[in-house]
């Protein structure tokens, strides 16, 4: 948990999310993904209750809430990673470009919806081969060297590693490894990029670098980020969803949610009264 | 779904199925072995087999009573050598020794564990057969006992280390001396695991023939005491299977069934007891 | 536990160090001494073993020197001994065993670690552990009466007829041969490859596989291109372990290899292995040089397995540690 309780909700919102966002209404934007009435179970235990929300195209949507509220679980349904657990069960509908992802082929879905994990997890390969992995197995066209360079630039890592592309990914620092994972995910040109608390294992400087990155990346791809750091959500996101014990309490443009939250529970959470 | 993706998915399903086939084949071999032994040996096990001595070479019939008793004798002798060394050495490693000494002892035990059993036989030959100028049950027991040491040592150490701190500290807080704590609290807490490990070690050496070939050697009659050569089940199987007599082949199957049956029963028992909570250490 | 634990005060005045005698009376020093002696015995035995192997092969070593390793002749009558046919046979049969066992074993371990639900994986592993408990003579028994006839009547004709012109597949063959030994050895070492590889694969962090899947890999791709390479070193370790086991295997090999001290290119030719010749000829060895030559072979075998086992352990440790160290 980051420091500084929010007395009086003085979160600096205007500087980052952009003034335009304060005027934007979710309904006016095109939605890249739409989640409808999703209920999720692990075995007989229900984790998510009747979740419905939209993910705005080319914007950053943040999922916040206390530990155990289900935000990571929700994130993982967006690329069907929940299916790696045998007892998981999902009811409802999740649309990507107006098509239900639950009935599509999962392998091609996951190319379109990428993921960056909580702890950096580069493969035991060189930096180059890590980024090249996705394009190679998906048979993407174009010279691989260029694709790798492009992705590394997008992840603000190119300058630091361009002379050591063939070194092992494990030689990089934690923050660099996470940016490598971002580059790796970007290399397959996903329509949506999911980030599951990407900075929780990193130092503040690396965290700041990645936050800067995210704000720029939304021009490339739609972003959904789970974070337990409210200031981070306020800094980088355009829309924020607040979850509590598996339910969606509030979903609003970020400046709105943080300055004038619609629900008392949201207010309690962002003022640090719990969580 | 384009063609490339279809191909990738096909490859994926095919290869994953193949891994299942590999697993199935590997396990199936076990059942094949059991099946053949039961089929070929089952009919040959009769009272005569279990109680009679081998008949003179060439004559049909007879049994392997001396080999059965011989194996039992060898195992007894092996335990007398291997268990104390392994058990007490393990106590030293777990309770008394410093890190450096411990790693030396562990290294030696691992080394000993990796020595091919025929080479253990050579060692036993030099140490027992040569000085005593003859093959003997003692030499065979010595060889098998050596093989039991590493397993017993490592298992004892592992299981003693697995005893929760609270148990130790509880005893010591009551004023018990170290050795009393070990004897009355720690060992009893770990004894199930240690005992099962010893059983597994016995099961392993029970089936060894190579170290016996020039130590206990073999005997077509009863062997008296410890200084005479003795027959043993694995050794008899080897000699009979390689012989030219049909009847001896038949008896080899029967002996194989008896031997494997005993070994598997001990293994299954030991592993089921152990699996209730404690992991089986890898030998 | 293993390091120095504070000695407890006895029921009496405690002021600084207690006398040796009082510790003695407590029995702790005696216990420590006794258990130390037993632990030391283990080291003593091991040292003695290596020493005996060395000393008892002196005659042969002095007479033949390094030539021992490259001489093909094994002639007890003329007292000429060369280790080459046995080293050759040992290596060939073990290599054949690995060629068969490694793909099968790794495949099975992938199934057990990545695909099978935990209960099935554990049950199958249980059976595979039992397979490892089957003694060598029993494999030999099956080798003689099941595998050799199959080799003689099915496999050899099937391969020799079309391909017999190749030196690799030349006949004649009566059954016992390098290939038969290799096949039997393969069955014997598969359990080792499976158990170790399975453990190593299970220790690969979950998010490696998930990262691969999240990039649009199929299940096989994530397993083969990410998880298995991650565990590569440990799997190599299991192969070395299996090789060490195969090299030292005596009974099963003796019963099916053909016991012919000759080097031959054909898989179907009979051969000999180090362990097998020791097993067969040790008690027949007339004369000190003969015996010492055999013991010299034992020394060679010991060294081979010693090196391999050491390498194997190193590799396995390195991999299972990697699993916990990888993330920044």
Image (cartoon, rainbow, N blue to C red):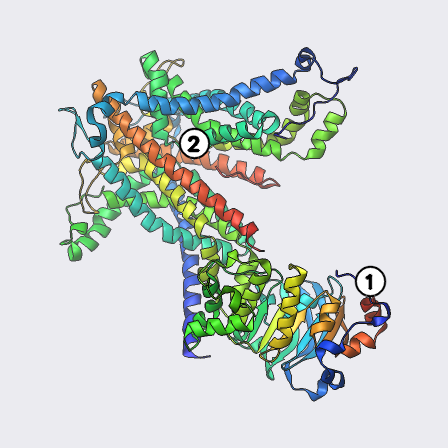
Residue C183 appearing in the image: no
Say which residue appears at 38% left-offset and 24% top-offset. Answer: C49
The x, y position of residue A143, in whole percent, is: 41, 75
Q: Which residue is mark 1?
A: A274
Residue C11 appearing in the image: yes
Question: Is B153 left or right of A30, judged from the image as shown?
Answer: left
Residue C22 appears in which quarter of the rendering? top right
The x, y position of residue B86, in whole percent, is: 51, 25
In the picture as drawn, the residue positioned furthest to the top comes out as: C21
Most foreground residue, B204 or A133: A133
Chain on which label 1 sits: A
Say which residue appears at 76% left-offset and 26% top-offset. Answer: B173
Most foreground residue, C299 or B136: C299
Say which residue appears at 37% left-offset and 53% top-offset. Answer: C103
| Dot 2 crowding, Cα within 10 Å, few <14, some 14–19, many 20+ | some
Residue B230 appears in which quarter of the rendering? top left
Q: Which residue is mark 2?
A: B111
Q: CA distance from mark 2 to mark 1?
A: 58 Å
Instruction: Relative to B177, say whether A272 is above or below.
Output: below
Most foreground residue, A160 or C271: A160
Foreground mark, 2 or 1? 1
């Amino acid at each position: 948990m980051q420091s500084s309780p929010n007395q009086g909700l003085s979160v600096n919102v205007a500087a980052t999310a952009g003034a335009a966002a304060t005027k934007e209404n979710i309904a006016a934007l095109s939605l890249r993904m739409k989640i409808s009435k999703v209920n999720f179970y692990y075995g007989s235990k229900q984790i998510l209750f009747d979740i419905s929300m939209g993910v705005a195209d080319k914007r950053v949507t943040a999922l916040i809430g206390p530990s155990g509220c289900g935000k990571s679980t929700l994130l993982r349904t967006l690329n069907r990673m929940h299916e790696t657990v045998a007892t998981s069960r999902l009811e409802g509908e999740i649309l990507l470009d107006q098509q239900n992802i639950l009935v599509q082929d999962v392998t091609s879905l996951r190319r379109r919806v990428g993921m960056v994990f909580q702890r950096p997890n580069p493969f035991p390969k060189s930096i180059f081969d890590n980024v090249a992995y996705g394009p190679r197995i998906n048979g993407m066209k174009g010279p691989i060297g260029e694709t790798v360079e492009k992705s590394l630039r997008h992840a603000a890592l190119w300058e630091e590693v361009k002379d050591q592309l063939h070194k092992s990914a494990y030689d990089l620092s934690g923050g660099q490894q996470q940016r490598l994972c971002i580059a790796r995910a970007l290399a397959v040109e996903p329509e949506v990029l999911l980030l599951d608390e990407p900075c929780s294992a990193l130092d503040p400087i690396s965290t700041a670098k990645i936050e800067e990155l995210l704000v720029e990346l939304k021009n490339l791809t739609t972003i959904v980020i789970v974070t337990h750091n409210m200031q981070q959500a306020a800094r980088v996101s355009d829309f924020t969803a607040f979850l509590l014990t598996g339910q969606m309490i509030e979903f609003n443009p970020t400046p709105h949610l943080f300055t004038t939250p619609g629900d008392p529970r949201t207010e309690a959470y962002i003022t640090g009264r719990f969580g | 779904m384009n063609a490339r993706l279809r191909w990738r998915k096909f490859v994926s399903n095919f290869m994953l199925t193949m891994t299942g086939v590999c697993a199935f084949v590997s396990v199936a071999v076990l059942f094949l072995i059991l099946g053949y032994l039961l089929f070929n040996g089952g009919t040959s096990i009769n009272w005569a087999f279990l109680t009679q001595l081998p008949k003179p070479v060439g004559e049909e019939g007879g049994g392997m009573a001396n080999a059965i008793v011989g194996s039992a004798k060898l195992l007894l002798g092996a335990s007398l050598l291997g268990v104390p060394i392994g058990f007490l050495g393990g106590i030293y490693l777990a309770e008394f020794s410093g890190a450096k000494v411990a790693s030396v002892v562990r290294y030696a035990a691992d080394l000993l564990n990796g020595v091919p059993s025929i080479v253990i036989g050579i060692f036993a030959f030099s140490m027992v057969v040569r000085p005593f100028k003859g093959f003997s049950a003692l030499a065979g027991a010595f060889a098998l006992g050596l093989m039991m040491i590493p397993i017993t040592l490592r298992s004892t150490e592992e299981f003693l280390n697995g005893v929760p701190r609270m148990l130790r500290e509880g005893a010591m807080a009551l004023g018990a001396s170290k050795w009393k704590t070990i004897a009355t609290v720690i060992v009893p807490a770990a004894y199930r695991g240690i005992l099962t490990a010893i059983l597994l070690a016995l099961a392993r050496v029970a089936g060894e023939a190579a170290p016996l070939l020039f130590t206990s050697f073999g005997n077509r009659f009863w062997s008296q005491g410890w200084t005479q050569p003795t027959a043993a089940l694995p050794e008899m199987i080897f000699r009979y299977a390689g012989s030219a007599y049909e009847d001896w082949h038949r008896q080899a199957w029967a002996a194989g069934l008896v031997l494997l049956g005993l070994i598997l029963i001990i293994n299954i028992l030991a592993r089921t007891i152990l699996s209730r909570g404690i992991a089986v250490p890898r030998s | 536990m293993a390091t120095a634990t504070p000695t407890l005060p006895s029921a009496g005045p405690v002021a600084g160090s207690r006398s040796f005698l009082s510790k003695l009376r407590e029995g702790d020093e005696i216990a420590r001494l006794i258990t130390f002696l037993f632990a030391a015995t283990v080291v003593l035995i091991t040292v003695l073993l290596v020493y005996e192997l060395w000393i008892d092969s002196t005659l042969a070593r002095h007479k033949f020197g390094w030539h021992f390793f490259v001489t093909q002749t094994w002639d007890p009558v003329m007292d000429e001994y060369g280790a080459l046919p046995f080293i050759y046979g040992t290596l060939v049969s073990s290599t054949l065993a690995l060629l068969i066992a490694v793909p099968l074993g790794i495949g099975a371990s992938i199934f057990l670690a990545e695909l099978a639900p935990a209960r099935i994986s554990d049950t199958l592993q249980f059976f595979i552990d039992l397979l490892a408990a089957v003694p060598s003579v029993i494999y030999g028994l099956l080798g003689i009466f099941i595998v050799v006839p199959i080799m003689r009547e099915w496999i050899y004709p099937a391969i020799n007829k079309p391909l017999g012109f190749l030196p690799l597949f030349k006949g004649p063959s009566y059954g016992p041969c390098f290939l038969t030994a290799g096949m039997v050895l393969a069955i014997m070492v598969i359990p080792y490859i499976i158990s170790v590889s399975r453990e190593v694969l299970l220790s690969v962090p979950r998010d490696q596989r998930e990262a691969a899947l999240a990039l649009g890999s199929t299940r096989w791709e994530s397993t083969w291109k990410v998880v298995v390479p991650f565990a590569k070193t440990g799997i190599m370790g299991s192969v070395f372990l299996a090789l060490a086991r195969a090299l030292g295997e005596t009974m099963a090999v003796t019963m099916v290899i053909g016991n012919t001290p000759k080097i031959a290119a054909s898989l179907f030719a009979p051969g000999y292995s180090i362990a097998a010749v020791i097993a067969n000829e040790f008690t027949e060895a007339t004369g000190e040089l003969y015996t010492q030559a055999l013991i010299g072979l034992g020394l060679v075998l010991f060294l081979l397995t010693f090196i391999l086992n050491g390498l194997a352990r190193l590799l396995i440790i390195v991999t299972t540690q990697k699993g916990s160290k990888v993330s920044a």
